[in-house]
Amino acid sequence: MATGTLTTERILEATEEMLRRHGAAKATVVDVARALGVSHGTVYRHFRTKAELREAVTKRWLDRTSQALSGIVSGTEEPEAKLRHWLAGLFAAKQHKAGDDPELFATYTVLTGENSGVVDRHIADLTGQLTAIIQEGVTRGEFTAPDPASTSRAVFDATNRFHDPAYAGEWSKPGIEPAFTAVVDLVLRGLRR
């Protein structure tokens, strides 16, 4: 394959496939290059180090969730419905990531541990989305929150069991959906004016 057709996106797709196949401990830049039909030096022209490549693929994986949820934030639902929908969307996204491809989820759990800055930015993006929803509710007189940013972080922390990978083992257990609904109902009762 010619170097001119090699894009960052194609490298990230190939990296994700190598991570799926070999796991975080065994996937190498050489594997990625081989899958793309280029030399590993060509991959290094796009990503200076293996760590930079792993960080980029981790960011790409996390950004999928943020992007999906951003549509809810900009939607036309009332703030309470929007918040409920957003929290359910986050939970569903995490359940799918863990349940649909457990090997890749385990690999990304390792990668997120290596890339705490990427994770911190992801959490900041998610709590920023929550802040926008809560601020909208305050502006419309539906929610009470003296500091929407602090409140959004509290909501994020209160629902941690339903999106933190440390709890992934619980996400498919019986009773998890009613537990999620009970926590969301509690959060919404606390926010209502």
Image (cartoon, rainbow, N blue to C red):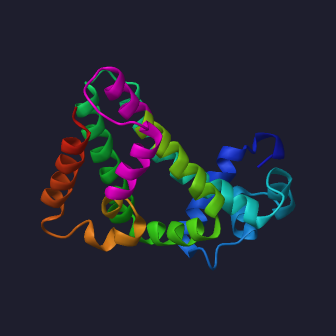
**Quick one: which residue is furthest to the bottom in this view?**
25
Which residue is depicted at the point 25% across and 40% down? 84
| Along the viewing direction, whichever of 155 and 44 lies nearer the viewer | 155
Residue at image position (75%, 59%) is 52
Q: Position of residue 147 (x, y in %)?
A: 43, 38
81, 168: nearer the viewer:
81
Q: Is residue 1 visible?
A: yes
- Where in the figure is residue 137, as x and y percent of width and height? 32, 28
Q: How many marks?
A: 0
Q: Report the residue at 87% width, 61% height from top.
A: 41
Residue 142: quadrant of the picture: top left
Relative to 21, 30 lies left or right: right
Q: Is residue 127 left or right of residue 160?
A: right
Which residue is outermost to the front? 146
**Secondary structure, magenta segment, majority class:** helix
Describe residue 48's horizontal placement relative to residue 65 as left or right: right
- Asked if residue 67 shows in the view, the reply is no
Q: Is residue 77 magenta?
A: no
Relative depth, front residue between 43 and 4: 43
Q: What quarter of the picture does the C terminus occupy?
A: top left
Q: Quadrant of residue 25?
A: bottom right
Identity of the residue drawn at 74% across and 57% down: 37
The stretch in magenta equals 132-159
Relative to the observer, which residue lies in front, 28 or 60? 60
Q: Position of residue 185 (x, y in %)?
A: 17, 47
Q: Residue 135: horizontal and vertical position, in percent?
A: 40, 29
